[in-house]
Structure formats: structure tokens, C-alpha cells
Image: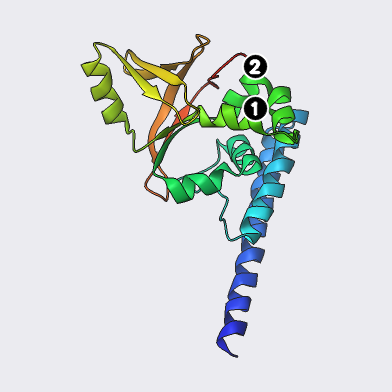
């Protein structure tokens, strides 16, 4: 078997194994969450997962940790092709709403944004959750300390996020007055970026 044939064989095996893993996880998720909104997002995630795998994950948001709580975010990022930007131009810090956060925000609204032909509103929403550079929890805490209990961070979208401490938790506030609490900090991205899971969706403007 020549080198080209060997590479094709390895790639085919990888795709089959990856597909089985995705289907298994989809089956488990459907059993746990059997709502219409969840089924819709599950289908989206499956579609984008197959498409991303076929393209050698060039447009994927690649966590080194688990993606169990961020399937909706992954679907939204892939729909806007922001994943490619994040991989090529990083590192970035992402404040990642959990699936529960997106459901709380509005499952219908996020579904509309993902399906829309014009992705500008979705890109604006997602890029408001991204800050350039490695903004670890310790760096955020130091900035809050220097700012007498408050720190401001400029997002890729252009508008600012305000951070403060509530007890031991870092809380983010958007221009609308909405708040999001960091529930899991310093998850690593493969391009040396940082992810902080948050419990709410933050907005650059009224939607």
C-alpha cells in the first residue's frame, strides 16, 4: 500500500470513529433533554460537526476540555465562521454561555439568528463574548483590584464589558445591565486561548 492510500485509509477510519462518537453523544443527550428546542440544536450540532470534521476542523472552536455544555455555542460559532478567525488570529478569551444560558436567553431567538441568511446580528452577539489576548481569571482579578473593585474589557465586537466581584465570583455586566457569572474559569483552547463558562448570555445592544 503506497503512502497516499495509507493516508486515505487513516482519514476514513478517523471519520467513521468520530461519527460514531457524535451519534452516541447525540443519543445520550436526546434521552436526557427531550424538548423541541434541544432537538433543534442537536440537529444543528450534528450537521456542523460532520461538516467541520470533513474540513479537517479548520472552522471549529477547539477546546482541549469537554464541550458537553457548549453545543449551542459551537453551532453558532460555526454558522458565522468565527471559528476560523479564532484559530488563525488568536489567542482570544471567550466568555462562553452554557447551553442552559442560551435556553434562558431565548431558544427561539438564537435559533432564528443561526438560521438567518444575514449573520451580522449573530456575529455581533458572539464577538461581544470575545476579548483579544489571554485574559485568565487571575488577570481579571488583578484588573478588578487595580480598578477599585471594577474592571473594563473591550470586546472584539467593540463595546466594553464591566467585571466586578460578587463574593468569590467574577460577574460581567453588559451595556443593557444584564449580568453573567463565571461558573468555570480558565478552560484552555488549543491555540493558547482561554474560555470562561458563564451562566447567562450578555448583549452588546437590545435584541
Check the picture and name the quadrant holding the C terminus. Answer: top right
135 versus 27 height, above or below:
above
Residue 35, can we see it? no
- Residue at (62%, 58%) from the top-left corner? 53
Query: Which residue bears the numbered disc 1?
Result: 121
Q: Position of residue 13 (x, y in %)?
A: 62, 71
Instruction: Give the SS element for disc 2.
Output: loop
Q: CA distance from mark 2 to mark 1?
A: 9 Å
Q: Nearer the viewer, residue 192 or 85?
A: 85
For the N terminus, give its image quadrant: bottom right
The percent coordinates of residue 92 (x first, y second) are 41, 39
Residue 199 appears anywhere in the view = yes
Q: Nearer the viewer, residue 170 or 80?
A: 80
Quarter of image, res 195: top left
Tag 2 near tag 1, CB within 8 Å: yes
Q: Residue furthest bottom?
A: 1
Q: Position of residue 88 (x, y in %)?
A: 46, 51
Q: Earlier in the sequence, mark 2 or mark 1?
A: 1
Which residue is labeled 2 in the image?
207
**Crowding near the residue tagged with mark 2, few <14, some 14–19, many ≥20 C-alpha atoms within 10 Å:** few
Amino acid at each position: 500500500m503506497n503512502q497516499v492510500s495509507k493516508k486515505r485509509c487513516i482519514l476514513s477510519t478517523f471519520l467513521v470513529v468520530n461519527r460514531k462518537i457524535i451519534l452516541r453523544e447525540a443519543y445520550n443527550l436526546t434521552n436526557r433533554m427531550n424538548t423541541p428546542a434541544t432537538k433543534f440544536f442537536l440537529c444543528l450540532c450534528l450537521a456542523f460537526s460532520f461538516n467541520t470534521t470533513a474540513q479537517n476542523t479548520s472552522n471549529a472552536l477547539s477546546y482541549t476540555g469537554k464541550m458537553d455544555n457548549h453545543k449551542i455555542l459551537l453551532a453558532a460559532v460555526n454558522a458565522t465562521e468565527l471559528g476560523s478567525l479564532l484559530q488563525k488570529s488568536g489567542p482570544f478569551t471567550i466568555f462562553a454561555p452554557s447551553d442552559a444560558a442560551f435556553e434562558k436567553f431565548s431558544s427561539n431567538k438564537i435559533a432564528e439568528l443561526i438560521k438567518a441568511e444575514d449573520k451580522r446580528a449573530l456575529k455581533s452577539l458572539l464577538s461581544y463574548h470575545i476579548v483579544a489576548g489571554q485574559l485568565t481569571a487571575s488577570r481579571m482579578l488583578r484588573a478588578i483590584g487595580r480598578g477599585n473593585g471594577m474592571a473594563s474589557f473591550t470586546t472584539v465586537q467593540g463595546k466594553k464589558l464591566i467585571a466586578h466581584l460578587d463574593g468569590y465570583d467574577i460577574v460581567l455586566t453588559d451595556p443593557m445591565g444584564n449580568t453573567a457569572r463565571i461558573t468555570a474559569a480558565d478552560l484552555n483552547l488549543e491555540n493558547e486561548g482561554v474560555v470562561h463558562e458563564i451562566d447567562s448570555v450578555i448583549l452588546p445592544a437590545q435584541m
